[in-house]
Amino acid sequence: MKSFTAAALAALWAQQAAAHSTFQQLWVDGTDFGSQCARLPASNSPVTNYNSNDMRCNVISTRPQVKCPVRAGGTVTVEMHAQNGDRSCANEAIGGAHHGPVSVYLTKVSDAVTADGSTGWFKIFDDGWRKNPSGRVGDDDFWGTKDLNSCCGKMNVKIPSDIPSGDYLLRAEAIALHAAGGAGGAQPYMTCYQITVSGGGSASPPTVSIPGHFKASDPGVQVNIHGAMTNYAIPGPAVYAGGTTKVAGSACSGCEATCAVGSSPTTSLTAPVSTSTPAPGGGTPGGCTVQKYGQCGGQGYTGCTTCAAGSTCNTTNQYYHQCV
């Protein structure tokens, strides 16, 4: 009996680990920028210390040296998958019954490449919970993470038209509630994207600090979704007046429905870290190198593939090659 219990627990933990995920790619008005401006997390595990600065942008493996260009009033589409570089729609974006809300925040910064996320954040998007009249418990209801699974990991987010132009960190967050019945059981997954907004206005949205945008005891953080639910409060502040809210269980629309890998060429930005290589007789420098622990290849990757001196490109994972 003991061995069966241990085996069952081991299987459960393996299933939960396999269900961990990360936001990885970004589309801008239907154009695929891949992971070029994403601060990719070091792993697909959640951040479990809600008071840690890692709540801002996760434990990042590399900080890109580029920013994705975004129009004020335009639409970005964040994309989540379980494994780095795996954009297959055959796999759930976040599996293992990891149901919960999806929220997106912005913080205005002087330089998105060097910003640490200590500036104030405001929420521009929510996709939370809606009662399923045919369901029995919260697991059966409609959730933001279920919408991610229905739309091949994609979620459309409108950039408010009235925010000032300039650099921002855009932070996508999904909170898995399958183990949230006890304090500290909710599992937040987040990624920051480095963007530059153009054509903006002069609004000054109220902000919150991260960490600190929610507490372990908040009703939307400590909640039992395995029983019947009559309401749910999405963690964090209210969505800014210029932002949007998606009704959980709504159909995929826009880029969520039509954007597929290869449907538009991936737009290449300046290489993450470039080093000048003098051209014969002078002229425009060429070539680039990737810092240690940065991405150097993998399925769908179009960036620089040469690792900096002292590191080599590990190609063991077909989806994500890394300089080590």
Image (tube, rainbow, N blue to C red):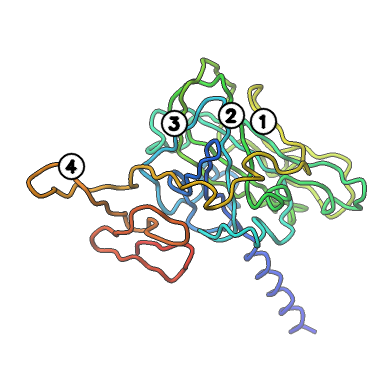
Type of amino acid under label 3: Thr
- Residues tagged 3 and 2 counted as in contact (Cβ below 8 A): no
Distance Cα–Cα, label 4 vs label 2 = 41 Å
Q: Which mark is residue 196?
A: 3
Distance Cα–Cα, label 3 vs label 2 = 16 Å
Distance Cα–Cα, label 1 vs label 2 = 8 Å
Residue depicted at x 46% and y 35%: 195
Residue depicted at x 71% and y 62%: 96
Quarter of the figure with the N terminus:
bottom right
Secondary structure under badge 4? loop
- Residues tagged 1 and 2 counted as in contact (Cβ below 8 A): yes
Residue 53 appears in the picture as rendered: no
Residue holding disc 4: 284
Residue holding disc 1: 237
Question: Residue 101: percent from the left, percent from the top?
Answer: 71, 44
Looking at the image, residue 230 sits to the left or right of residue 24; the answer is: right
Type of amino acid under label 2: Phe
Q: Residues within 10 Å of mark 4 (few under 14, many from 20)?
A: few
Residue holding disc 2: 122
Q: Which mark is residue 166?
A: none
Quarter of the figure with the C terminus:
bottom left
Give the number of the mark in front: 1 or 3: 3
